[in-house]
Image: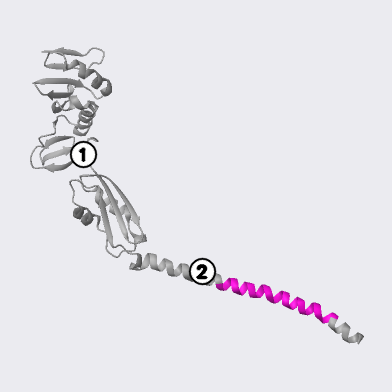
Amino acid sequence: MRKSTTRESSGGPRDRGRRGQVEPRRRFRAGRWIVLVLLGMVTVAAVLVFFTPVFGVRSVQVRGTETLSSDRVRQVASVGQGTPLARVDRDGIRRRLNELSRVDSVRIRLVWPSTVSIRLVEREPLLFERTPEGIRLVDDDAVPFAGSAQPPGDLPELRLSGEHPERARRAAVAAFTALDERVRAQVRVVEFVPSAGVRMSLTEDRTVEWGGAEKSALKAAILPALLTREGNTYDVTSTELPTVSS
């Protein structure tokens, strides 16, 4: 009886030791299978998202167009139907759309599961300019863009002379945009003359000698009061000594 008791007491710890070694192995195997299953799920999801049309482009939404047509924007954007949304080349779309002269800025969003959203801001014409290629519109960034068959009746004309038309255009636009709305509505021609700077022709045969683009805000503040006086030529080239003459 004592021997039997001794065997039982000596065999018990070994059994517990074996069971203690088996449990971690089982947990390890279970964990390994969970990891493999998760990796498989991630792989399948990646394939579906990046390499199949399951999450492919089905529609292209265009917003913000005024002069441009939505169909024209879609054509230039050239987003392939069925292209996986995750692989849509937004930089490429933006680059192609920016080649349209009327486009000022572009914002592109991917709307899951299947939509590309394009929001445009078109350039707003401020002046028009006659060029050898025809009439061009000019925006408030002094950027000439889309042409026009006829001079727009509601826009003043921009006339440039000299060897640096871009610099002259920026100076003329800076002067014109500094004006308040009431004075701007009276302008018919904005001209840049190398020897005199910016000159504006107003209604009622009046002329504004503006000069350089510096101190444009101060010149614009002085001009409305000056225009209340009788005269034909209003000179704000010197903000310290503005003058009116006939």
Residue 50 in picture, x, y percent from top left: 38, 65
Residue 89 position (above or below residue 161): below
Quadrant containing the C terminus in the rendered view: top left
Q: At numbered mark 2, what does the secondary structure look like: helix, strand or loop?
A: helix
What number is the disc on residue 93?
Answer: none
Residue at figure coordinates x 20%, y 44% from the top left: 102
Residue at figure coordinates x 63%, y 72% from the top left: 28
Residue 94 in picture, x, y percent from top left: 29, 51
Of the numbered discs 1 and 2, the one sitting upstream in the chain is 2
Q: Which residue is mark 1?
A: 124
Q: How is the image coloured?
A: one colour
Q: Name the image quarter holding residue 197.
A: top left
Whole-number angstrom distance, CA of label 1 to CA of label 2: 53 Å
Q: Is residue 214 visible?
A: no
Residue at figure coordinates x 56%, y 73% from the top left: 33
Q: Is residue 88 visible?
A: yes
The amino acid pointed to by label 1 is Glu
132 and 239: which one is in front?
239
Residue furthest toward the front?
Answer: 1
Magenta residues, dominant SS class? helix
Residue at figure coordinates x 30%, y 54% from the top left: 117
Residue 10 in picture, x, y percent from top left: 84, 80
The amino acid pointed to by label 2 is Leu
Residue 104 in picture, x, y percent from top left: 25, 43
What number is the disc on residue 38?
Answer: 2
